[in-house]
Amino acid sequence: MSIITEPTTTPATDLRARWAELLQEQPTLRIRNAAQALGVTELELLVLGVGKSVVRLRPEFAAILGKLESLGPLMALTRNDDVVHERHGIYLNASLDKGPVGLFVGRDIDLRIFWGSWAHAFAVTEDGPKGPRRSLQFFAHDGSAIHKVYLTEKSHADAYDGLVASFTHEVQSEKVVVTARKPRTPEMPDTAVDVSGLREAWLGLKDTHDFHMLLGRFRVSRTQALRLAPEGGHAVRVGGKALRQVLSSAAERALPIMVFVGNPGMIQIHTGAVKNVVDARGWFNVLDPEFNLHVREEAITESWIVRKPTVDGMVTALECYDTNGDQIVQVFGARKPGIPELTEWRNLAAEVENAWRP
């Protein structure tokens, strides 16, 4: 089912009025939260600013992202409903036109891009505490935000202006089509799963990236695979505060980690130490100069210590899931292909596992 918002129709006019009324009551409310309160998508609110604070861009996503390096230092933001990942840096080492997955593999900006979800692009100017805040924002077919790129004080504003001018859409309209996301495929019963085959395939993994293909081969969800994992500690369920324990302990020990946050169109990765781990405004956070993470901790309904064999030895992760079984954040020890996992990270994972044993 599609929802179409026309710029001159009563629904759009009504939506603009409802949003204005909501902002009068809650002037600091972010657009994503406003959309949830109003029962619409973030995209449907954003397009109401086209012609004023919002410029619609042509949906030439790879070409636009290919220009980001020229903008200098930026802030990359990727989120899902419950976790926000913000990383400062330069968009380096792009590989954007070689198939369904694009890449940036810089030391600071590290992204995996899944083009099939990408549908809309905009340049946005918002009021910020230090003046106008400018960004490029990309949205999925279902109206959810995939990725946002914010200018910083160190960015090349002239290059940004040139990019926007080069990719401005010839039609600047508030019209938008939002297509509902396909419903989740129900899990088949555990009794219908080839459990022995699944476990054998798990034990035969050579690369953690092959795990996704394993799920498809045996037609299981991620959390179902974890429930049915090989014995011997390959998947151990831990408590909802395990992420807090991992991040706090990693900060105390200056242990470099990798933090993955994603949505259907993007995975964003931070590699390095974390330092300032705090609670603030109802969220659990990392608030470092170049990396911010914001976690709605109560949304974590399942946490697992997961171990997968690779050609470089066992690789261990903390994986956190929401009530729908969607992975919302994943943490590894910092590593690169060809390099074994850090012993210090394995020890921390074992500590977390032991802390939550019944």
Image (spheres, helix red, strand yellow):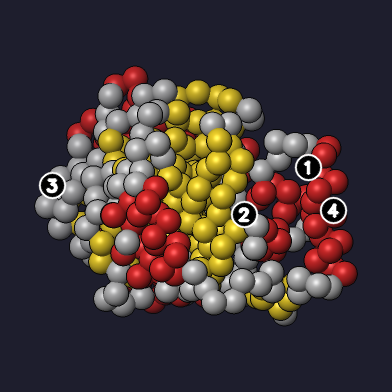
Which one is earlier in the sequence, the residue at label 3 or at label 1? Answer: 1
Residue type at mark 1: give it: Leu
Classify mark 1: helix, strand or loop: helix
User: Callout 1 environment at 10 Å: few (<14), some (14 to 19), or many (20+)?
Assistant: some
Sequence-wise first label, 3 or 2: 2
Relative side of 139 to 162, left or right: right
Locate the N terminus by quadrant: bottom right
- Mark with earlier residue (4, 2): 4
Residue at 30%, 69% in the rendered image: 96
Answer left or right for 23 relative to 181.
Answer: right
Most foreground residue, 270 or 177:
177
Where is mark 2, residue-wise?
53
Q: Position of residue 103 (x, y in %)?
A: 30, 62
Residue type (three-letter) at the residue carrying disc 4: Arg
- What SS does tag 2 mark? loop
Query: x, y percentage for residue 311?
Result: 15, 58
Residue at label 4?
18
Q: What is the C-alpha distance between the residues marked 4 and 2?
A: 19 Å
Quarter of the image for residue 226 reads bottom left
Q: Residues at badges 3 and 1 in contact (C-beta under 8 Å)?
A: no
Q: Residue at x 56, y 58 (%)?
A: 145
Using the numbered discs, state the Cα–Cα distance from disc 3 to disc 1 in whole angstroms. 51 Å
The amino acid beneath tag 3 is Ile
Pointer 4 local density, CA inside 10 Å: few below 14, some 14–19, many at least 20: some
Residue carrying label 1? 23
